[in-house]
Image (tube, helix red, strand yellow):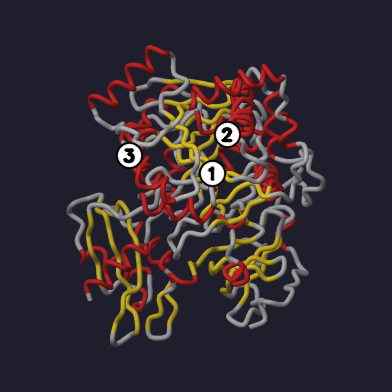
Amino acid sequence: MMVDQVIECKERPWQKNYGPGTNLDLGQFEFANLADMVTRSSAKWKDKIACSMVLHNGMESKLSYSEIELYSDAFAVYLREELKLAKGDRVAIQLPNCLSYPIAVFGVFKAGCVLVNANPLYTAYEMQHQFKDSGAKVLIIIDMFADKLKEVVPNTSIENVILVSVVDFFPILKKTIVHSVLKFVKKQIPKCEVYATRIASALHKGIKIQKAKQLNPHKYWSNITQDDLCALQYTGGTTGVSKGAMLTHKNLMANMYQIVEMGKSKIEPGNEHILSVLPLYHIFAFTVNLITFYYCGGESILIPNPRPLKNLEKAFSMKKITWISGVNTLFNGLLNEKWFAENPPKDLKASIAGGAALHKAVAERWNLVTKTIVVEGFGLTEASPVVTFNPINGIIKGDTVGIPMPSTDVVLLNDEGIPVQIGDAGEIAVRGPQVMKGYWQRPEESSKCLKGEWLLTGDIGVMDNDGYIKIVDRKKDMILVSGFNVYPNEVEDCIAKLAGVGEVAVIGVPNEKTNEAVKAFIVKKDNSLTKENVLEHCHKFMTSYKVPKQIEFRTELPKSPIGKILRKNLREESIKKI
């Protein structure tokens, strides 16, 4: 293996395709850290709406940039003065998309502490693992899952718990009505059996202390450098034990600037509105929807619970939506909603796809229905997350994940760690300012994927002569059939073109004759669809060894919180049946 040696990237064929006005090099950052970015952006856009939240029944609440500045300052003071946290202490935030989320996150930045994003749907076991691993001292959690705390808190380093309601910052009457329905009618708010403080009380206390001591939160973050740790962003756990990617202020700000550079021909600062369906605790929405659009003076329209997709109808009818970020399943699901197909968003400029492969059939339908493009990129938690993106300012190739971001190099490597020829498949290695420092307290795991300045992604791609990359699959998801490589994305894309298919996932299962065989899991859109229909369609477009040998129809497929289909779960289920 030669991957531990320095990989040179002598040619950058993608640079000619960024489009006019795109800076190839990010240059010097204008902000010292993310707390600085939040403070200065809040002042710049002070009267504009920063975040709004729309419930499925149309009830809405909003916060301006100046309000978020006020509350996040107060929260920083509360963390440092009342809870006695110090620079670098970890704070876990376990919230859905709600108005308390940006306040808590920005307050952590301003306190000079380290953010630990956590999935609200985690089991007690998963919570314990992440909180113990990170050493988090404070937990901010949605009250709907407070029943887990009695089991979790004693087994972690959590010293203080702050409770949040999804209707915090709603007008008092609406807040009382919704909270009563959730607690007494739907019984979705359990009793909290550990001592906890409500976020409203924490903010009130912070404001009181700030006034009494005449504190300026700037003192907490004035010595925070770009290279200081900003967040521990835990990997999704779809490839093994969840690990904390150490992301610095520079990592996240670099990706923010890179995203803006790739799309600035369509971004109008101070006048953008992005629909935040994906959870903000996930790195994709965290960097794109929260960080980048806050910097741009945009409004993030928060959806706390997007399931079923009918829950989005009011947001689409009430709000001006200029951007949507999502995964393939979201775009596909919206297209299958009658209310969306009949009345697509009129102000939409473009949509951003990531997290999982965007099926060509879905992209084509989206363009047909919305009359706008859905642009695909590629990234991973360890790169903050965006590595490549189709340049909205330049040439878009719809069947690719685009070209490397500005100030980013990408090479494709064979199994010996040697760069492959243009057009050949290889593991994607990336070098750029968005690449993490390593995994938290896991030097051995870090050394497996970080080789000098280069991050080995574990994803297999092909680069064309213009520098555009097509993902052919995760290294571990590749199926080996009689010595031939079969990439699940290719088979899924083929099957998805069949009219009666709603969703599809493909895995490899053990086979005595061929080592592995292709198995497809399909959710029907048309109940008349048969296995014979699928096989006939596949044989038309793929060579025989790629055609599924097994087909299983399901009512639904297992998904991660952001809607990414979990092949790992399907693989484990299939192996157990053997």
Contact between marks 3 and 1 (CB within 8 A): the answer is no
Q: Residues within 10 Å of mark 1 (few under 14, many from 20)?
A: some
Relative image position of residue 42 (x, y in whole percent): 67, 26
Q: CA distance from mark 3 to mark 2?
A: 23 Å
Which structural element holds mark 1? loop
Question: Relative to the observer, which residue lies in front, 289 or 441?
Answer: 441
Relative image position of residue 247 (x, y in whole percent): 63, 52
Q: CA distance from mark 1 to mark 2?
A: 9 Å
Q: Who's the residue at 63% across and 83% down the image?
A: 1
Q: Who's the residue at 74% across and 51% down the image?
A: 227
Quarter of the image where one finds residue 3: bottom right
Seen in the picture, residue 294 relative to 254 is either above or below; the reply is: above
Residue 578 is tagged as: none
Residue 333 horizontal side relative to residue 42, left or right? left
Quarter of the image where one finds residue 81: top right
Q: Identify the residue under disc 2.
A: 83
Question: Relative to the observer, which residue lies in front, 65 or 198?
Answer: 198
Query: Disc 3 marks which amino acid?
Result: Asp
Relative image position of residue 8 (x, y in whole percent): 75, 72
Q: Is residue 278 visible?
A: yes
Seen in the picture, residue 186 relative to 172 is either above or below; the reply is: below
Residue 203 horizontal side relative to residue 566, left or right? right
Report the number of numbered marks.
Answer: 3
Q: Identify the residue under disc 3.
A: 147
Query: Disc 1 marks which amino acid?
Result: Lys
Residue 183 horizontal side relative to residue 253, left or right? left
Q: Who's the residue at 47% across and 24% down the image?
A: 319
Query: Disc 2 marks which amino acid?
Result: Leu
Give the mark, 1 or 2, whose residue is nearer the N terminus. 2
Q: Identify the residue under disc 1.
A: 137
Question: Relative to the observer, which residue lies in front, 32 or 90?
Answer: 90
Contact between marks 1 and 2 (CB within 8 A): the answer is yes
